[in-house]
Image (cartoon, rainbow, N blue to C red):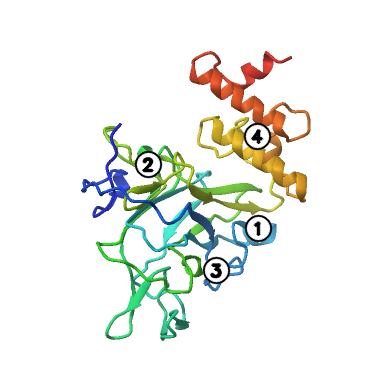
């Protein structure tokens, strides 16, 4: 499969297709990895703003009415060298919706005070993104060019639930952080809307992972960050992703879990084995929360312990399934008994 760069083109998000552009010469990337994180929007005037990647909504609040949670995707990079970004989101419940926070429209009820790294101060009621500048009239302007797509479902992205697509290009110029680092302000913002009376459970806002080139001729995965000559992707193991969990009420588990599928991409593979091993390493040196999801998915052999044995089982199954010798993880585990 050929690779087609995203530079100088924006993804038509609603159709999940990528426009044509010119290949660039290869150079070494400055960052070993970059990251995207779905979190509560820190600057919003909301009771949820400080909750990061794990938001809790009480029984009383969800019983009282619809809940609108301002959220954002944050970019984590050390070097401001991006040419293009593709970041598409969905949610694992048909009952939950997304709405847009318009970057060019007033968002705050009163102007907030900011300062660029060089000390230049400004005030605005607009939502401030990770990189920008001031116009001659002192209005905050986003660096780069955004395109968004919002739909109640998106078959190309493999979701029957709400879909929010975002593509960004640098427009052929550099960009400057609004704060001192890329994570000081969001890459983009949106709302998650929980309906009144939503059942207790754990709900996840996550990245859509698929090839945005519908023809299949080119490999243009999302999520992806592109710099000159280098792509940061899941497959290249240089793109760090953090997704958002929203716990409603007591957080009873919702839906069904797929054994071993730690990133819920529909495939049990080496990435999942690595996630289980990482969790085992972390739990060996510190206290970590073991959620219902982790108990049901990471403890592959169901012995009540999440350890290297579980990771090894996933890795062995993946090797067998890649050669057509095993149809399911459960079938492989049955051979061990």
Comes first in the chain, label 1 or label 2: 1
Task: Residue at 37% x, 38% y: name it.
Answer: 155
Provide the residue designation for mark 1: 56
Quarter of the figure with the C terminus: top right
Counting residues from the N terminus, which is met first, the one under dot 4 or under dot 3? Answer: 3
Q: For the residues carrying marks 1 and 4, which lies nearer the camera in this image?
A: 4
* For residue 110, above or below residue 311: below
Could you tell whether 113 is left or right of 202 in the image?
A: left
In whole angstroms, how far apart are the C-alphas of marks 4 and 3?
31 Å
Disc 3 and disc 2: Cα gap in Å? 28 Å
| Visible residue check, residue 148 | no
Residue tagged 4:
297
Cα–Cα span, label 2 and label 4: 25 Å
Secondary element type, mark 2: strand
Q: Which element carries disc 4, helix, strand or loop? A: helix
Q: Earlier in the sequence, mark 3 or mark 1?
A: 3
Residue 244 visible somewhere in the drawing: yes
Which mark identifies residue 42?
A: 3
Quick one: SS at disc 3?
loop
Task: Check contact, mark 4 vs mark 3: CB within 8 A.
Answer: no
Give the x, y percent position of residue 332. 63, 17
Task: Measure how far apart labels 1 and 2 are at the Cα level.
Answer: 31 Å
Label 1's element?
strand
Q: Nearer the viewer, residue 72 or 60?
A: 72
x and y percent of residue 22 in the render? 21, 48
């Amino acid at each position: 499969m050929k690779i087609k760069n995203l530079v100088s083109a924006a993804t038509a998000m609603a159709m999940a297709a990528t426009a044509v552009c010119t290949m660039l010469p290869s150079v070494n990337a400055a960052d070993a990895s970059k990251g995207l994180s779905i979190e509560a929007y820190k600057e919003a005037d909301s009771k949820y703003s400080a909750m990061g990647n794990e938001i809790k909504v009480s029984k009383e609040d969800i019983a009282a009415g619809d809940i609108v949670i301002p959220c954002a995707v944050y970019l984590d990079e050390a070097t401001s060298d991006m040419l293009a970004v593709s970041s598409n989101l969905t949610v694992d419940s048909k009952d939950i919706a997304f709405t847009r926070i318009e970057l060019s429209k007033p968002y705050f009820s009163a102007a907030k005070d900011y300062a660029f790294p060089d000390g230049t101060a400004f005030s605005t009621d607009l939502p401030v993104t990770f990189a920008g500048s001031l116009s001659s009239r002192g209005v905050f302007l986003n660096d780069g060019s955004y395109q968004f797509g919002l739909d109640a479902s998106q078959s190309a992205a493999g979701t029957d639930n709400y879909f929010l697509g975002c593509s960004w290009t640098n427009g052929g110029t550099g960009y400057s952080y609004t704060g001192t680092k890329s994570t000081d302000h969001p890459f983009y913002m949106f709302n998650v809307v929980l309906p009144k009376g939503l059942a207790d459970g754990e709900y996840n806002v996550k990245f859509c992972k698929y090839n945005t080139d519908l023809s299949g001729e080119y490999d243009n995965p999302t999520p992806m960050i592109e710099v000159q000559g280098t792509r940061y992707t899941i497959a290249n193991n240089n793109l760090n992703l953090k997704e958002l969990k929203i716990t409603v009420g007591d957080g009873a588990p919702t839906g069904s879990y797929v054994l071993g599928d730690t990133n819920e991409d529909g495939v049990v593979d080496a990435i999942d084995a690595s996630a289980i091993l990482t969790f085992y390493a972390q739990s060996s040196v510190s206290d970590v929360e073991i959620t219902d999801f982790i108990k049901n998915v990471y403890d592959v052999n169901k012995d009540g312990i999440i350890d290297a044995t579980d990771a090894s089982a996933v890795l062995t199954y993946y090797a067998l399934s890649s050669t057509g010798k095993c149809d399911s993880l459960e079938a492989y585990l049955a051979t061990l008994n």
